[in-house]
Amino acid sequence: MLKMTQRLAFLSIVVAFTTIIIIPMARAQDSSNQELAQVLRELSQQIQDIKKEHAAALQTMQREIDALKAQLQQQAAQTTLPSTVTTVTTVTGVPAAAAISTASRDDDEQELYAAIKSSAAAMLPATPVPGVDLDASVIIDGFYHYDSHKLGVSHLKNSLAGFSHAHDQDDAGHDHEHSVIEDGFNLRHLELGLSAAVDPYFTAWTTLAFDDHASEVEEAVIQSSSLPWGLTLSAGKIKSGIGRMNHQHSHNWDFFDQPLVYDALFGDHGLTDKGLQLTWLAPTPFHFLIGAEAFQGNHETVANYLGSDPFPRHNGPRLLTSFLKFGPQLDEQHALQFGLSYVQGRHQEEEDHDGHTHYFNGYNRIYGADVVYKYDAKRPHGHGDVVLQGEFFHRQRDLELLNNGQDYNNSQDGYYLQALYGFKPRWRVGARWEQLGVTNDVHDVHDGKLSYCASNRASAMLDWKLSEFSLLRMQTTNGNFATAHGREDFWEFIMQLQISIGKHAAHDF
């Protein structure tokens, strides 16, 4: 009886809710929703009828119970009844016939309840279930490329004066080059992203990159979601929080390619390694974030580790970083953020020169500063928005030549400045200026200390975000690079089409 009453009370609440909320919404929609409203009204009427029958049944059952109690009291006064009589004549305090009638009525109401629940569930969004619901996305990034240099821009990037010596050689003795782009049609890679809320304590995500020749785990992160005091702990293969662009994947760049200073100091994929990251978000009215990271130290340009004779062995972590982000409190249309970064990594190199092999062991230390300003015009699809951004990095490389105990020191830097403007809804135009090696002092084993010139590059970009899932971009670049063979000029043109499929996590500020 109690369960039946509770169900009817719940059904009454459901009907009241659907009458107040769903029916007015249905009337505002097309004619198919009017049929749904009619069905709900009919269901409401059926429940009202059942309630009336239920009230009448309760009165009848109460009269039967009162009569039975009076009969039992009268019999008890005459003689003692066996306890089995009560057991036979009652079922949980209700006469057997009434219990059968009630069970039949409960079945009808249960079917009606299931029908209403099914209809309501179809109209409500699904609720994520931790550890079960998995968000997945695929990024397809294709482009057409042309440049005017006879050897190609990829070759020039790997031959920049003062920066090219760090690349290893392959088994055939040829220089190891990165990001080789052919003129014509290319696929940068296919990027698969998976993420989920694991449980109340952790979230996790991974990013996998596939191309024609290989696959790579770009990120695989387990992150805490319930630590106190504004702390967040992340573990796995992590894109470091240093700088502004380092933690971004290529599909989130504002230009087709990353700045030269990132290519030279951090490589194709930025500073990414296996380890731990701890951040603290201060409880202040403005944005203030401090982070520290400890990585194993297997990064070709920052913390290269060889570890076999004649190199000394070093246990991990061999790469440490720290960073700070500060954003003053501005009005809702303006946002500003400053950042400072520090990187220190144990570094080892093996270099062949004129038939001789040189072994270097020491440290890389990188100091960085970044700033970004955003103006939100509060117009549709980025119309009128402005973004100004810049970063500067300085690297101090202190290595010992193990062959004879001499020191080998570099002092190098680079920066970029860029601006973007949304001149129409979904349309942006951008410009970027960059220099690598404004300071470019290198201590060569044979020639002593050398000072090289800076490499310059200017780019202009136009992109059209057709929807939230597709982007068309055109970019042209003019470069003047300092190489071992002198200064080299080139023009570069790129047309890019980027498609996103599935759920993708929102990007940071």
Image: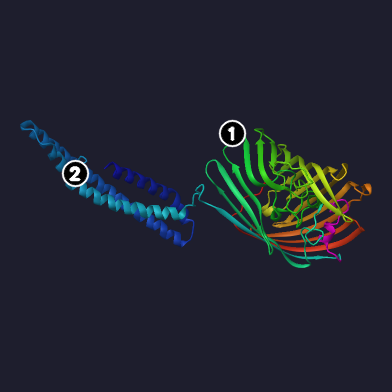
Q: Name the kind of residue labelled 2 in the image.
A: Thr
Image point 56% across, 43% down: which residue? 202
Quarter where residue 338 is shown: top right
Q: Who's the residue at 75% across and 54% down the image?
A: 268
- Residue 14 belongs to magenta span: no
- How far is the residue under mark 2 from the one under mark 1? 60 Å
- Is residue 123 placed above or below 9 in the rendered structure? below
Q: Quadrant of the C terminus?
A: top right
Q: Is residue 75 left or right of residue 437?
A: left
Q: Is residue 181 visible?
A: yes
Relative placement, left or right, of 53 versus 385 is left
Q: Where residue 491 is drawn, which disc sits there?
A: none
Foreground disc of the pair 2, 1? 1
Contact between marks 2 and 1 (CB within 8 A): the answer is no
Q: Position of residue 50 (x, y in %)?
A: 28, 50
Which quarter of the rendering shows the N terminus?
A: top left
Furthest residue in direction bottom, as rendered: 184
- Determine which of the numbered discs, if any, sits on residue 228 in the image: 1
The reply, left or right, for residue 74 in relation to residue 396 is left
Q: Give the secondary structure at mark 1.
A: loop
The residue under label 2 is 60
The residue sitting at the left extreme is 78
For the view shown, which residue lies furthest in the top direction?
77
Q: Visible in this render: residue 393? A: no
**In the image, what residue occupies the spot 73% across and 65% down?**
186
Which of the pair 173/488 is nearer the observer? 173
Q: Amino acid at mark 1?
A: Pro
Residue 441: x %, y % from top left: 90, 46
Residue count near mark 1 (Cα–Cα under 10 Å), binned few <14, some 14–19, many ≥20: few
What is the span of residues highlighted in magenta in the rendered image?
150-165
